[in-house]
Image (cartoon, grey):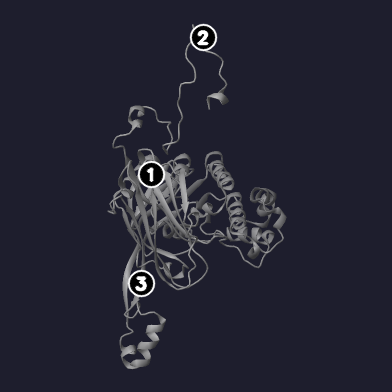
Amino acid sequence: MSDIAISVSNLSKRYRIGHANNVDWGLRHAIEKFLRNPFKWWRNRKIQTEDFWALDDVSFEVKNGEVLGIIGRNGAGKSTLLKILSRITEPTTGRISICGRVASLLEVGTGFHPELTGRENIYLNGAILGMTRAEIKRKFDEIVAFSEVERFLDTPVKRYSSGMYVRLAFAVAAHLEPEILIVDEVLAVGDAQFQKKCIGKMQDVATREGRTVLFVSHNMGSLVQFCERGILLEHGKVAAQGPIDLVVKHYFSSAAKNAVWKANPHDAFRPQKKVFFRRVELLDADGAPSTELDVHKHFFVHMEYEVPRAFKPVELSVRILTTDGAPVMTSMLSDCEQSAPEIEKHGVYRATVRIPGMFLMPGSYLINVAAHAGAGEVFDSLPGIFGFIVLDTGTNYTKYQHNHHMGVVMRALDWQDELVAMRNGHEFPDIKIAEAI
């Protein structure tokens, strides 16, 4: 019997994208042009098409019981690859061989019917995954206990929060004994405690039960801790594969090469978003794009985003992380005196946040940016969009470079140092700390 669980050979996926000549008109301008000259409008409405390769000649193998991490920036082809492996969509070219039953958790509530209760959806989802009713019944109590939604088990899932959806969906996928478990970044929706619980469950599935796991995440710390091997996708191609720590280093080095991010104009999901980023830049103190920043000087994160339709306030956030995925700080637009803007008109908006100098310790970092609603709904998210280096151009910390436990932030705090007593003979007089302060 072969020890290969998944074999992918020369896999490619092509999408055909259409572009109308009048795509940039907008509804009002399109109606105006039609009323002025309907014959010319009809003649110019030809649709131009082009091919977009979401995956291009991807090949790799996964052994039985192996945990494989799939890394890549947004639009690299990770979700397309998982959908093909889950048999949700067909590849254009290439060959896939899968040995074993596959359970996949790609989106919140995948395979759930909104009108059915949580109890009914457990049986429905289990049947979709190929389990018998007896198997589902045997695991039912464990699924409910893990999901922590017992109180709402007989409530239609359309009334569940996104976090409850994730809990129940992951519990079903992880407990129905698949030989292969595929998990996308969907776990980011849950709270930190539940994410830790899910990571522990997947470790049990992989190590104790010997099953195969494919894990997509932007949390590099979890990937390094959980996975053995990794694959890095860039523009639909395999840029690197091998031991997870080496692949993560390759990802960081590639992320640090560019300080300007532009949205893919062929992104098929962009028109469906309430808000989406068009351009993001990492700028040094002089306003020039750079991924090498002076520890003494401030720098900027500049965002340009589009709102297709007017609606409630938009919250923006910028998060800085260490290279192993640990959060350093998060700043939100609503933190400043200017609250989140009331979006009264559709259009393009710009926002800039300034990070002060002498704030981050010299070292390597990542940046996440996101646009979301105050209630927690995420409109657009760009995790790990930039990798950058803070250069030590002369600080008091250089003398302590041998010490790797000094933290990740530095600030000049208010210190008070004064003489409070002189030696009298061989002893100091008793001094209370409160008096010294």
Lateral position of residue 130 relative to residue 272, left or right: right
Residue 306 position within the rendered picture, expressed as x and y whole percent measured from the top left? 41, 67
Helix, strand or loop status at disc 2: loop
* Structural crowding at the residue carrying mark 3, measured as other residues with C-alpha within 10 Å and reported as few (<14), some (14–19) or many (≥20): some
Q: Position of residue 31 (x, y in %)?
A: 40, 87
Residue 427 badge: 2
- For this orientation, the residue located farthest to the top is 425
In the image, which disc is placed on residue 213? none
Q: CA distance from mark 1 to mark 2?
A: 50 Å
User: Between residues 247 and 135, which one lies in front from this camera angle?
Assistant: 247
- Residue 160 spot, x, y in % from top left: 64, 61
Give the spatial CA distance, label 3 vs label 2.
Answer: 85 Å
Whether residue 63 is visible to the viewer of this picture, yes or no, is: no
**Mark sitting earlier along the chain (3/2):** 3
Discs 3/2, front = 2
- What residue type is disc 1 on? Tyr
Type of amino acid at the residue the image marks with label 2: Glu
**Please, is residue 209 above or below residue 22 in the view?**
above
Q: Nearer the viewer, mark 1 or mark 2?
A: 2
Tell which circle, 3 or 1, labels the residue nearer the N-terminal end: 3
The amino acid marked with disc number 3 is Ile
**Which callout, 3 or 1, points to the residue nearer the camera?**
1
Looking at the rendered structure, the number of numbered marks drawn on it comes to 3
On residue 365, the disc is 1
Residue 90 sits in which quadrant? Answer: bottom left
Are the two marked residues, 3 and 2, in contact with CB atoms closer than 8 angstroms? no
323 vs 78: above or below: above
Query: Is 32 situated above or below 360?
Result: below
User: Is disc 1 placed on a helix, strand or loop?
Assistant: strand
**Residue denoted by label 3:** 17
> SS for tag 3?
strand
